[in-house]
């Protein structure tokens, strides 16, 4: 069936109702299980924000505490949620969605894991290779990144960066105007931070020589797995 429907999953020995996304809405066919929905400027939630910031932010990424489970019953809306599927659901693909204004765009990461938590919570960098143009395509024509570094994957913050406030992303890409990754001022992704615009936790921020100028583009992010 191509019709999305509510299903009941048994997670942590309790039933959890989520919307199973069917059909090819942008990530390919099959059933997709929601994991998170992240508002790019609702900093009170801090769903999967980077390490190197406050203890509060680190704990948000490393803990197994759900937030607003009913948000998993609706589709690509503005209701933030962090579901038990973050630490309880294995997968071979991750669907990333980004809504800028009313425009919703998707891309897929082919990656097997026991859970998204297992890829993120320890803070270790894990590389992927979508390419900078794919990340920019999530944002659209306003997307901007500096030209160098282009470090992408999970936990992208450079361990040798000059200051903790340089750009980072739990899932995404960081870029720099210098020919290294130690002072990145631009990023696209989910669970992002960095100076100039630390308040944009999902979306695109670019300063100091972005290829499409200085940008501050928060988005509504969606993470699903299959």
Image (cartoon, grey):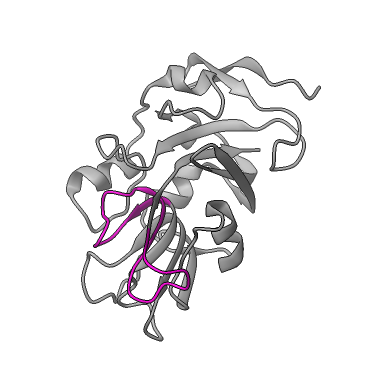
Depicted 108 relative to depicted 164: above or below: above
Horizontal and vertical percent position of residue 175: 42, 72
- Looking at the image, residue 132 sits to the left or right of residue 194; the answer is right
Horizontal and vertical percent position of residue 92: 66, 46
The structure residue drawn at horizontal position 36% and vertical position 26%, both measured from the top left corner, is: 67
The structure residue drawn at horizontal position 27% and vertical position 40%, both measured from the top left corner, is: 43
Is 86 colored magenta in this rendering? no
Q: Which image quadrant for residue 216?
A: bottom left
Magenta residues?
A: 190-215
Q: Which image quadrant for residue 170?
A: bottom left
Quadrant the C terminus occupies: top right
Depicted 25 relative to depicted 217: above or below: above
Residue 156 visible to the viewer: no
Q: Which image quadrant for residue 56?
A: top left
Toward the viewer: 63 or 207? 207
Horizontal and vertical percent position of residue 11: 50, 22
Instruction: Name the residue at the bottom extreme.
Output: 179
Toward the viewer: 43 or 83? 43
The structure residue drawn at horizontal position 45% and vertical position 22%, both measured from the top left corner, is: 71
Quadrant the N terminus occupies: top right
Toward the viewer: 59 or 105? 105
């Amino acid at each position: 069936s191509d019709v999305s429907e509510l299903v009941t999953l048994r997670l942590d020995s309790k039933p959890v109702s989520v919307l199973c996304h069917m059909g090819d809405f942008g990530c390919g066919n099959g059933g997709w299980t929601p994991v998170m929905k992240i508002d790019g400027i609702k900093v009170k939630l801090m769903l999967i924000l980077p390490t190197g910031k406050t203890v509060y932010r680190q704990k948000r990424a490393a803990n197994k505490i759900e937030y607003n489970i009913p948000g998993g019953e609706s589709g690509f809306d503005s209701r933030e949620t962090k579901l038990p599927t973050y630490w309880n659901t294995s997968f071979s693909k991750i669907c990333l969605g980004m809504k800028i204004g009313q425009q919703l765009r998707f891309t897929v990461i082919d990656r097997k894991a026991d859970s998204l938590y297992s890829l993120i919570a320890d803070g270790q960098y894990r590389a992927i290779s979508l390419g900078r143009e794919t990340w920019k395509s999530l944002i659209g024509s306003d997307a901007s990144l500096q030209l160098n570094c282009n470090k992408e994957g999970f936990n992208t913050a450079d361990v040798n960066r000059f200051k903790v406030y340089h750009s980072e992303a739990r899932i995404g890409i960081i870029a720099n105007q210098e020919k290294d990754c130690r002072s990145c001022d631009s990023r696209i992704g989910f669970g992002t931070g960095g100076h100039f615009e630390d308040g944009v936790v999902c979306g695109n921020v670019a300063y100091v020589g972005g290829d499409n100028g200085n940008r501050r583009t928060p988005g509504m992010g969606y993470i699903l797995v299959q």
